[in-house]
Image (cartoon, rainbow, N blue to C red):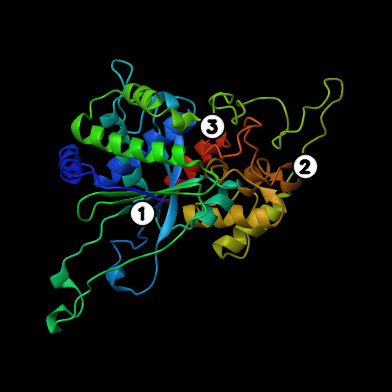
């Protein structure tokens, strides 16, 4: 475990966030995304972050005892609009063609993305993974703590009882886990597994503190300048990655080969006809999920009362029956007849996540959240999380 407590940075960070009309958590998330980009050489990164899981719109939610904490995926388009699958404009609708994409632009993009997804913070990570039909979505974790610590407001204060000290001891399975406490001052802690070299973890922690300072003092700095500076000052960040070109684990869209990486069929041998999901099975799954007695081939899922949550149940049930459906297909093909054409049998897919190539001499994890995900799968994740709202 590594720890840093930069003096005076907390106040500057809060003032900067307030001026930009974002939260300190948005700023911290942006800093972590930039460091992950420097670690991996990627310009589109995904990490996990913990959320309270208590919807503010539900009266009394904050008074219910028990743990509601959830871990959700957070995508950080470090490279700007060009980093998103298929190109297009950035989350905030800006066009970076006329000027450089700055860290201030990135903070705003992160803020707007997170604001749109706040209503689905309660959705379990396992449900998101099952709906997408992929393995682990990320291999790093971010925790931003901001707990009120008013001693006079603590239970028992009126009768002279006070909490004088609180200590916690926890562990995660992630190679890198960053915890930033902005409650009183600024405390930055990086936990790492033994498989991550200490000098690399130390460089990551120092880089996080440096980027936080930059976000507070010089938010108009171009993102590429930040990444170039980190690479120059912290060479240990990319240690062991020189032999792996950026994006090496991501097959290009439309590349030959089966989804599980098997070689393509011989050009002289016609491929076997793909198996088709019987429409009757989709009708049964729709009826079960919607709680209706019967569904016809051309009945519209949403016209029958379906929504994004029930759509997740449909994809999960079909998977349990041996078929995988792209989650957004339920929205694009909402009838049993059309959805059946988009399903694929699970036995033609690889259940294990694709292997990430690495140099034979490098025994440490690449810590590259997106190298094992294609642009199509990233689009599926974005669509799923948006449609949940």
Question: Is 291 in front, or is 53?
Answer: 53
- Could you tell whether 276 is left or right of 367 in the image? right
The answer to whether 317 is drawn above or below residue 158 in the figure is: above
Helix, strand or loop for disc 3: helix
Residue at horizontal 51%, vertical 43%? 196
Residue on which the image places disc 1: 119
Q: Earlier in the sequence, mark 1 or mark 2?
A: 1
Which quadrant holds residue 31?
A: top left
Question: Is 124 in front, or is 367?
Answer: 367
Count neighbours of disc 1 (C-alpha within 10 A) and say few if under 14, some if 14 to 19, many if 20 or more. some
Which quadrant holds residue 145?
A: bottom left
Q: Earlier in the sequence, mark 3 or mark 1?
A: 1
The answer to whether one can see residue 304 in this image is no
Residue on which the image places disc 3: 375
Residue 275 image label: 2
Helix, strand or loop for disc 2: loop
Q: Position of residue 301 (x, y in %)?
A: 54, 52
The alpha-carbon separation of the residues under discs 3 and 1 comes to 25 Å
Q: Is there a contact, CB below 8 Å, between mark 3 and mark 2? A: no
Question: Is 334 in front, or is 86?
Answer: 86
- Could you tell whether 261 is left or right of 128 in the image? right
């Amino acid at each position: 475990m590594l720890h840093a407590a930069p003096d005076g940075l907390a106040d500057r960070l809060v003032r900067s966030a307030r001026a930009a009309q974002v939260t300190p958590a948005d700023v911290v998330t942006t800093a972590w995304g930039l460091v992950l980009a420097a670690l991996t050489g990627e310009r589109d990164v995904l990490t996990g972050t913990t959320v309270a899981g208590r919807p503010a719109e539900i009266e009394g939610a904050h008074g219910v005892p028990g743990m509601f904490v959830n871990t959700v995926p957070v995508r950080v388009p470090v490279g700007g609009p060009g980093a998103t699958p298929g190109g297009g404009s950035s989350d905030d609708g800006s066009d970076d063609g006329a000027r450089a994409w700055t860290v201030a632009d990135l903070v705003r993009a992160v803020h707007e993305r997170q604001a749109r997804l706040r209503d689905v913070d309660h959705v379990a990570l396992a449900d998101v993974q099952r709906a997408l039909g992929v393995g682990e979505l990320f291999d790093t974790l971010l925790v931003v703590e901001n707990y009120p610590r008013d001693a006079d407001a603590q239970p028992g204060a009126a009768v002279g009882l006070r909490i004088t000290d609180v200590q916690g001891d926890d562990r995660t399975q992630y190679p890198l886990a960053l915890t930033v406490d902005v409650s009183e001052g600024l405390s930055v802690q990086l936990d790492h597994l033994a498989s991550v070299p200490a000098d690399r973890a130390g460089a990551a922690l120092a880089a996080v503190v440096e980027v936080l300072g930059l976000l507070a003092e010089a938010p108009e700095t171009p993102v590429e300048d930040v990444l170039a500076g980190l690479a120059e000052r912290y060479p240990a960040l990319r240690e062991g990655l020189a032999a792996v070109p950026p994006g090496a684990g991501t097959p290009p869209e439309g590349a030959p080969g089966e989804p599980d990486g098997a070689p393509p069929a011989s050009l002289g041998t016609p491929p076997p006809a793909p198996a088709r999901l019987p429409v009757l099975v989709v009708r049964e799954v729709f009826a079960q999920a919607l709680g209706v007695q019967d569904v016809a081939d051309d009945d519209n899922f949403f016209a029958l009362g379906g929504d994004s949550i029930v759509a997740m149940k449909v994809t999960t049930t079909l998977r349990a029956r041996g078929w995988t459906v792209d989650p957004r297909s339920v929205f694009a093909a909402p009838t049993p007849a059309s959805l059946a054409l988009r399903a694929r049998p699970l036995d033609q897919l690889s259940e294990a996540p694709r292997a990430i190539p690495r140099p034979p001499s490098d025994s440490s994890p690449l810590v590259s959240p997106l190298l094992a995900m294609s642009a199509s799968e990233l689009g599926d994740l974005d669509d799923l999380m948006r449609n949940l709202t």
